[in-house]
Amino acid sequence: MKPKSRLIIMLAILAITVTGYIWKVYPQVNTPDLVNEGPVPHNTPASENNTRTAGESDVPSPATTVAQTEVLPIPETSLNSDRDAVSNGMELNFEGIELFDEADVFLEYQAFFEQFESDTSLTEEEIQYFFTRMLATLENSETARNQISKVYRNMDSDAVVERSIMQEMLMKTATGQAILIDEAENILNTGQQELYPYMFEIYSNVEDDISYPVLEKAIESTYNSTDIRNSVSALNYIGKLESSEMSSSMYLYTTMNALRDVANNNEDESVRGLAVQKLYRLTPPAESTQIAINYLTSDANTPLVMETLYSIGSGDVALNEPLRFALHEALNRTGVTSAELELANNILGEV
C-alpha cells in the first residue's frame, strides 16, 4: 500500500478541490455536488408528483507527549464529510500523540511536503501519522497555529495540491477550521480574486449559513470568471442559498438571473449543468419541471441530463409526462453515455 495508496490520496485530493466532481467521464453513477448533496434513491421509479422535503531536518525534533493511546487514522473523506463529522461532535483523540516542537512546526511541515512530493515509498500510515501529530500540535500551541496560518496564507494561488493537503488536514478540527476561516476572511477583505475558489470552498464547507459579502462575490464570479474551478466553487456556494434564511431576500432575484446567464452562456457544459441544478433547487419543483424541459430541448448534454435525473430523484424537479418525453429524446441522442442510461434506469425505471 505504497505507490498505490499514495496515488489514491492524490487523486482524491485533486477531485475534491479542482471541481468537486468529474463531469466529462462519469465513471460511475454518483452524486457529483460537493455541498449539501443528499443520497439519491436508486432502483425506485420517481413518482409523477415527486416533491422535496425540505487533507527540514532529517533528525526528528524533540517532542513532548500527552499520554499513551493509539494513533487515530485520519479518514480519506471529502471536505463536506469532515465538516459534518466535526459539527456532529466527532472529536479526534490526541491522547498519546507526540507533539512537534512548536519552534520547528514550519520546518516539519516543509520537510513532510517535500518528502510527500518526491518519495513514493511514503505510506498512507506515515501520512496519517504526520497529519495527526500536526493537528495535535495545533491544538496545544498558539505558536504552532500562527506558523501554520502563515504557511497557508503565503502559498501561491496555483499550489493546488499543497493547498488541498492543508485544507484537508485543517478541516478535521475546530481549531483547524478557525485557521481556514481566518484565511477566507483575509481573501475576501483583500479581494484576491485568484484565491476566490479556496475562499468559496472554505465558506461552503465550514459555515452553515450564507453571508451577503461572500454571496455577492460568488454571483460576481459567475458573470466574470472563465476559470472552471472558480465557477464551480462559486456555484456551490450559491447553492447554500436554498437552505438559508436569505432564500426569500432581494438577493434571490439577482442570484436567479446570474444562474440563468451561466446556464445559457458559459462555454463549459459541466458549469452550465451545475448552474441549472442550482436553478432547480431554488425553484419550486413544479416550476423546475418547465426549466428542465426548456434546457433539455435546447441543449441536451451529459451534465445537464445527469443533473436533471439527480434532481428528479431528490425531489427538486417534479416528473410529468412532458418532462419524461424530453428526457426520452435526450437519452436517444447521438453521444449519450452509458452513465446517463444507467442513472435513468435507476431513477425513472426502464427507459
Image (cartoon, rainbow, N blue to C red):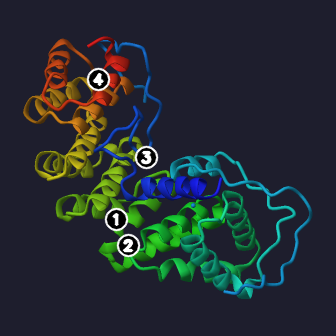
* Neighbourhood count class around disc 3 (C-alpha, 10 Å): few under 14, some 14–19, many 20 upward: some
| Farthest residue, direction right | 68
| Whole-number angstrom distance, CA of label 4 to CA of label 1 | 41 Å
Q: Secondary structure at mark 4?
A: helix
Is 177 rendered above or below residue 276?
below
Q: Work out whether mark 4 precedes mark 3 in sequence or the reverse, and give the earlier one.
A: 3
First of labels 2, 3 by sequence position: 3
Q: In terms of sequence position, does the residue under pointer 1 or pointer 2 come before the other? A: 2
Q: Report the mark closest to the observer, 4 or 1.
A: 4
Estimate the x, y position of residue 71 in percent, counting from the top left: 80, 58
- The answer to whether residue 254 of the structure is visible from this angle is yes
- Marks 2 and 4, how far apart at CA: 42 Å
Seen from the viewer's position, the closer of residues 74 and 286 is 74
- Is residue 236 left or right of 203 when viewed as pictured? left
Q: Which residue is mark 2?
A: 188
Q: Mark 3 — residue? A: 35
Earlier along the polypeptide chain: callout 2 or callout 4? 2
Q: Residue 24 placed where, x, y %? A: 28, 44
Task: Specify the amino acid type for callout 4.
Answer: Leu
Residue type, mark 1 in image: Pro
Under circle 2, the secondary element is helix
